[in-house]
Structures are given as structure tokens and as C-alpha cells.
Image: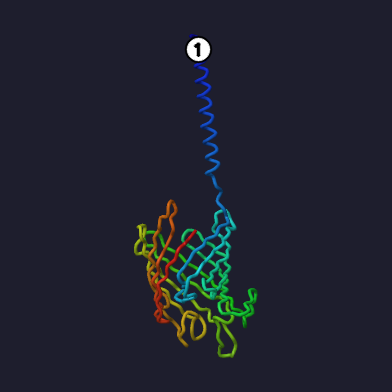
Amino acid sequence: MKNFLIASALSFAGLNGYAQNATEIDTIEKKQINTTKTSRLDFNVGIETSHLWRGLVINDGMTATGNIHYALNESQTIKVGFWGGAGFDGTYHEIDYYVQYQKNNLSIAIWDLFNTTGIETPKSFNYDKLTTTHLIDLRTSYRFPKNFPLRIEADIILYSGLNDRELNNNNEYRSKNSTYIELSYPLISDQKVNLNAFIGAALPLHGSKHLYTTKTQTDFDIVNTGITASKNIEIFNYKLPVSATAMWNPANKIARIKLDVNLF
């Protein structure tokens, strides 16, 4: 009986030790499995019913968009990337290149916009001031703190060939440096459905008209007003961000409803 008790005690101690060891190993393995390093490289894909930009209808049909970006520093405040869009009917094509600094609520970026829609033989690396279709765009924005979360955006076309230039008094081509300024404010936030309102204006720093109007001559216009409602749709354990935007451009007398799905 004594020997049986001793054997039982040793067996229990061994099993207990094994259980503790197994638990420790299992915990370590789970930690290793769940630990994923933050990647500097990422990409996003979305689908839009139309592609709108600063009050302009860039593509009036179903559009797929993609954004590939890489962080140059560990804090990921400086990123470089490629943004692109393509129409489902094959008529719209665009690829943009950018470098962006973003920290807290401040963002500063330089974008190289290259829309090849309607161009028979697009030249990707043509930056000649007389023939290029590239637009070099300076983008800045700042959002105030939560007690007054107004967002201010100011963008300037720094360089352009065919799209944002005109002849000056000396009969020389000069960039109009079209400037876009937008104010936006969250009317409803932290709810199941959030609502954001925005208004954007445009003006040329030089010349008789800016890029964002079809008028023959103008120095200031309201070109982009509207609201955006957004929410997450739950599909199994995945939250799919979706939004609906109602946009009006008073200067060009157009209006659109755009639906947007951010797939990942």
C-alpha cells in the first residue's frame, strides 16, 4: 500500500509537471503565432460607382482603385506610394506617384498625377512644360483637435503642361497654379452611421480661370459641396467600410451620388 501511494504521488507530480510544461509551451507557441511585426509595406483596394475629385467627375462609371505605399521610417510618418484607378469599361486609366509626411493631424504631400484617359500614346516620363499631361500637386491638410474637429485642406498645382496653363500677356505659356481649398466637418461621429459635410472652392493664382471649372473665365468658384455618410458592414468577423457621397458642383452645375467600398 505504501509503495502504491508513493507511485501514485510520483505519477501525479510527473503529470502535473508535464501539464505545466505543456501549458508553458502552448503559451509560447500562441504568443509566437499571434505576434506579427508591423509592416512598412501595405496596399489598399476599393471600388467606386464613379470617381470624383475636387468637384470634377473624373470617371462617370464603376471604378477600381488601388494604393500601394511604403513607410520610409519606423514611425511611419513618411510614406511613398502609387495610387491608381481604372474604369470597368476600360476608358479611364490613371497612375499617380506620391510622397507624404503625416503626423498627428497634419499632412503634407507631393503628388504626381498622370491620367491617360483619352490619350492615344501616353508618355509616362514626359515632363516637358509644353506637352506633358502630368500635374504636380502640393497637398496640405490639418484637422483641429476633437473639441472642434474642423479639417482644412489647401492644394496647389505647382507644375503642369497642357492641363493647367495659358498664354500670358507676353504670349508665353504660364502655369495657372490652380488652387483648391476645402473645409470639412464631422456632423455625426462615433455612431453606427457617421456624417461628414464639406465645401470646396477653387481659384487660379495666375491667369483667367482655374482647372476646376468649365467656364471660359473666372477667378473664384465654389466647386465642391456635399455630405458623406459612412459605416461598417459586418460580414462574418470582417468589418467592411462603405460610404455614400452626395456631391454638388455649383460652378459646373453638376451633381452626383457616389458609393464607395473599401475592400481592404
Closer to us: 255 or 165: 255
Please, which residue is most extreme toward the top here? 1
Check the image and report above or below for 192 versus 250.
above
Closer to us: 27 or 87: 87
Pointer 1: what residue?
4
Residue drawn 48% across the image and 84% down it: 209
- The location of residue 144, given as percent across then percent down, is 41, 62
Q: How many marks?
A: 1
Check the image and report above or below for 222 versus 31.
below
Residue drawn 35% across the image and 58% down it: 192
Q: Label 1: few (<14), some or many (≥20) within 10 Å?
A: few
The image quarter containing residue 242 is bottom left
In the image, taking residue 133 as reference, residue 261 lies left or right, namely left
- The location of residue 190, given as percent across then percent down, is 36, 57
Residue drawn 53% across the image and 22% down it: 14
Element class at badge 1:
helix
- The location of residue 184, given as percent across then percent down, is 40, 68
Check the image and report above or below for 5 versus 252.
above
- The location of residue 149, given as percent across then percent down, is 39, 62
Q: Amino acid at mark 1?
A: Phe
The image quarter containing residue 253 is bottom left
Q: How is the image coloured?
A: rainbow
